[in-house]
Amino acid sequence: MASPCPHILFAGGGTAGHLNPGLAVARQLAHQIPRACITFAGCGKPHEQHTVTTAGYQHVLIPGKPTPRSPWQTFRFVTDNVAGYLAANWILREQRVSLVVGLGGYASAAAVRAAISRSLPTVLLEQNVIPGRATTWLAPKTAMVCASFHEVRSRLQNGTTVRFTGNPVRPEFQKLYWAPLPQMQPKNGRRPRRLLILGGSGGARSLNENLPKALYKLGNGLRGWRVVHQTGGGQLRATQDLYRRFGIDALVISYIDELAEAMWGTDLVVSRAGGTTIAELAMAGVPTVLVPFPHAVDDHQTANARVLANASACRIVDELDTAGRFDDRLAGELRLLMTDENQRHNLGRHIRAFAHPDAATDVASAIGELLQVSPPVVRRRAA
């Protein structure tokens, strides 16, 4: 029998790329199952706690550590993750949790393992083409993996239930999807074109150091463009100094709170290639140059970018390519796109094909099915 008041625990987060899809699903669940209790559990990073509590949900702490990079870290890794497993078991029992949603990353592993040991239904959200290690390890024992890319299926063990839902995004990106796309409309000749540079919430030092150099090499090609550069924490001053040194008038900020609004009317984006970032770019339908983070686990950002590039939905600049300087290769791609509106239009149209505006609804419906709660879902018609 389904619980009259199901309690759903979202486990993980840590980064915005893992946390934001969970928040999007939680919001949809609150709409579909108003009597449900929703709690988030993570390792206690301040930004994570603030984001969750601001959204109106309880946040509980479950200790955990990522896979150690040196033998000296092994003891702490083992003890913290054992403590996390015990804490998760206690939370699941005392709070009578009905279902656990794993958001990915090491922070989700303890709660998902504990849920499996207690025979609770579990759902994993996988944002990338190459599934994370926690997903790969735990997926065969879970009820379902909700995947953002079709390619995930072949990378998981036989017998794993995979449901292609797309990656849930924040409500403001859903609104952006249904709005008309300014970059596909004729220019009035007065508004400067906008170049938006994103390195993720943690920033990207190599982009911060090389984009000002690359833009300087464009010379007059930068005329008529407005540069907006998100640096991430701790890198604002150094990046501002670089732009001043090269004589480029750029708006340089640490973090963009209203990213969907910033993408509205943006003509070109340079970005890392995390799964959630790609989902948001697709909803916005913006032409994009992806620069995958070369040290991401299993190089999953490059795999994400390749799927889009194979569909003519982005351009890629490989940071570790030895064929020429990184800033020169960035300048070459930017010069090509900033002077060719048709190419930008085509990239925006093709990346939009990767958008999944109903992803949060589909994941919430899957959870409702597992809880034996399946209210009717009203969908908007495609524009």
Image (tube, rainbow, N blue to C red):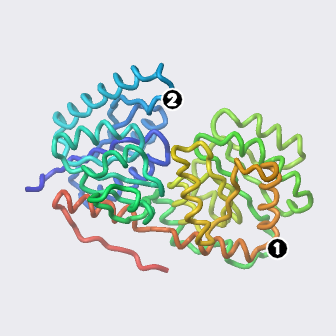
Circle 2 SS class: loop
Mark 1 closeness class: few <14, some 14–19, many ≥20 residues within 10 Å? few
Answer with mark 2 or mark 1, whichever residue precedes in sequence. 2
Three-letter code for the amino acid on which mark 2 is drawn: Arg
Residue under the image location 27 percent in, 31 percent down: 85
Residue 189: image tag? 1
Total number of numbered labels? 2
Left or right of residue 341: residue 154: left
Residue under the image location 51 percent in, 55 percent down: 275
Vertical arrangement, residue 355 with respect to residue 124, above or below: below
Locate residue 320, reporting x and y percent. Answer: 70, 47
Residue 69: image tag? 2
The mark closer to the camera, 2 or 1, is 2
Answer with the quarter of the image where residue 144 lies.
bottom left
Locate residue 123, reporting x and y percent. Answer: 29, 53
Vertical arrangement, residue 367 with respect to residue 134, above or below: below
Answer with the quarter of the image where residue 304 lies.
bottom right
Locate residue 236, reporting x and y percent. Answer: 71, 37
Left or right of residue 196: residue 141: left
